[in-house]
Image (cartoon, rainbow, N blue to C red):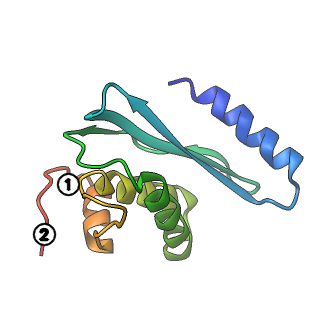
Amino acid sequence: MDLSKYEELSQKVLDIYPGMSTIAITLRAAVNANINGWSACMRDRENGFLSSKKYELTDIVDRVGGGDSFASAFIAGLNLYEDRQQSLEFAVAGSALKHSILGDFNRVNRKEVEALMGGDGSGRVQR
């Protein structure tokens, strides 16, 4: 995926809307209905352009709510972390996990999202 186009687009949006401080964009690379690449990028006026880790999602249960879960996790990440990269990674991990849950509601918790952010891709729920 050519991130330079998203880097340009995000800058244009911030140029057009001077009151906007941050833009985030999800990036889905669909192989088929069950296999997708999932990542995101963002730009803010202080830190510039950032891109996330890419998750290879297989055996997707439900794509419904993927964008909503990204947006809500991004807002949560902005409040949880000082570092914008961490905020973005939290959002992508949270929304990646949502793809394994049926329905529109993301039923994962912060600990599960942070485990995936930390590299635990086992799929095991730690409770």
**Residue 95's x, y, as percent?**
38, 55
Kindly identify the residue that appears in the image at 36 percent across and 34 percent down.
37
Which residue position holds label 2? 126
Kindly identify the residue that appears in the image at 47 percent across and 57 percent down.
70
Q: Secondary structure at mark 1?
A: loop
Quadrant of the image containing the C terminus? bottom left
Q: Nearer the viewer, residue 120 or 99?
A: 99
How many numbered discs? 2
Left or right position of 89 against 45: left
- Identify which amino acid the numbered label 2 is placed on: Gln
Choose the circle earlier in sequence order: 1 or 2: 1
**Residue 101's x, y, as percent?**
25, 58
Kindly identify the residue that appears in the image at 27 percent across and 72 percent down.
111
**Residue 65's x, y, as percent?**
41, 57
Quarter of the view holding residue 11: top right
How far is disc 1 from disc 2 in space, using C-alphas? 10 Å
Q: Is residue 10 above or below residue 97?
A: above
**Residue 49's x, y, as percent?**
65, 44
Q: Dot 1 surroundings within 10 Å: few (below 14), some, or many (20 or more)?
A: few
Q: Is residue 51 above or below residue 65?
A: above
Left or right position of 123 against 97: left
Left or right position of 27 against 45: left
Which residue position holds label 1? 120
Q: Is residue 109 above or below residue 35?
A: below
Q: Secondary structure at mark 2?
A: loop
CB-based contact (under 8 Å), mark 1 and mark 2: yes
Q: Nearer the viewer, residue 57 or 7?
A: 57
- Identify which amino acid the numbered label 1 is placed on: Asp
Front position among marks 1 and 2? 2
Q: Dot 2 surroundings within 10 Å: few (below 14), some, or many (20 or more)?
A: few
Quarter of the view holding residue 109: bottom left
Quarter of the view holding residue 93: bottom left
